[in-house]
Amino acid sequence: MWGRASRRAVGCTFATLPQEFKGEGTEEQQPSSFIFAQAPSAFPQFGHLKTLAQQAFQALLSMSINLHPLAIQGVAATPDKPLTKISLGLEYATISACRISVMNFELLDSVLLQTDFPELKLHASGKVRDVYVIDQERLLFVATDRISAFDYVLATGIPHKGRVLTQVSLFWFEFLRDLVPNHLVTADIGQYPKELQKYADQLQGRSMIVARADMFPVECVVRGYLSGSAWKEYKATGRVCGIELPKGLQESDRLPEPIFTPATKAVTGHDENIPFAEMARIVGPEAGGQLRDLSLAIYQRAAEYARQRGIIIADTKFEFGRTAQGITLADEVLTPDSSRFWPADQYKPGKTQESFDKQYVRDYLEEIRWNKQPPAPALPAEVARKTSEKYVEAYHLLTGRELDA
Ligand code: Q0T
């Protein structure tokens, strides 16, 4: 019964239990890839069995997360076209069951941890987003509710997160449209191919169809504040990506002016900061200059806007590609996942700033002294709920709109 209950909708695995906890005759329903069940409340049909299920969870010592074995096959099938970050941290051996806590029904009901559209070929799967091929010209981006911290995807999803990421990107695409063309085709489900209509409830609000672009193999990072790898580099060398900075800066200080600090896209491990000259060698000097100027202009406009609304965008990463429209802004844009958002009213240079969205998650993971090696733990319901509120608040502050329930 567990296997059946866990399979809530064709095409989308919300949560499943490991084999040990499946009843008889459910093997054929085992999805090709399975993910960790956050809580017995994933199975509201069996609400009366909740206590039993809780006991079962407590007795369980380990279970697996295995995201997208399909994606790994995808890499093997097309060695000439490496898929970004496919091999990065997508396999999790075991999860210690003692940290599993129960999310309430309303919250868990909407949480999407993994997508699965058998009609479509998976193009790439990141820590948070799954990308599918629609046809030669178009891709489908779906933002799940997965969350990563300290480089690993956690066992618990964050309600509304996927919709926030998608809606924030859509907001910025519109806000920036006179500055730069973007890859958005449509986020209107009614205009999606007809074979996707049956997944409308899963795609609604969290997906978009984009134009396939010839991607530049660099990350275009802009920093207005000194944080993260740039702070480390500055402390060690006084420079960031070869850019000389004033002496005596403190961690999280605002920079005299925003700087462009490109990075290579690492297939595994961390992106590596590179000097602009190196980037210009990779993409050519003309495109290099265009990408730098565009990135700085976009950051400048967006950061000024966000600052008036209580959010400091300390830094952010853009990805660009070439389409028929020329250099085109792609990927996700100025979201909490692709940027450092800081609450402006708590800004205090000289130390690491609290993250707008992930602070409760990081605090919790430090508190339980997770060793930051897989398996990544689950989050208590309260941490997931408060984190969800921060994402929804970021959406509200930036757009002035409510994220509808
Ligand atoms: C891409 C062609 O998919 C990615 O990350 C999420 C898991 C990164 N990525 C994007 C592309 C895009 C975009 N965006 C596009 N418009 N056209 N490819 C490839 N990798």
Image (cartoon, rainbow, N blue to C red):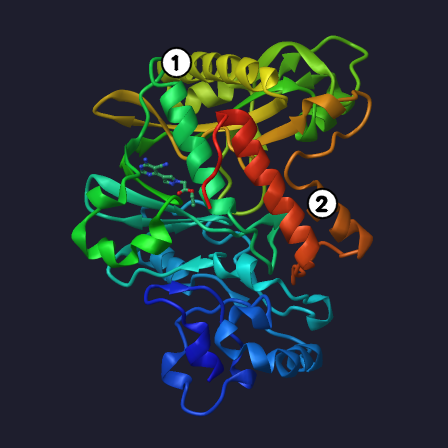
Q: Is residue 63 above or below residue 227?
A: below
Looking at the picture, how far across and down is residue 114, in whole percent? Answer: 44, 59
Looking at the picture, how far across and down is residue 48, in whole percent? Answer: 58, 81
Looking at the picture, how far across and down is residue 41, in whole percent? Answer: 57, 69
Q: Is residue 113 above or below residue 254?
A: below
Residue at the disc numbered 2: 360
- The residue shown at (63%, 38%) is 357
Whether tag 1 and tag 2 are in contact, CB under 8 A, the answer is no
Residue at the disc numbered 1: 290
Estimate the spatial distance between the alpha carbons at disc 1 and disc 2, rounded to whole Å.
Answer: 38 Å
Depth order, front residue of 319/20: 20
Q: Is mark 1 within 8 Å of ligand 1?
A: no
Q: Quadrant of ligand 1?
A: top left
- The residue shown at (82%, 22%) is 350
Q: Is residue 17 above or below residue 291?
A: below
Q: Is residue 232 above or below residue 64?
A: above
Kind of residue at badge 1: Gln
Mark closest to the chain's N terminus, 1 or 2: 1
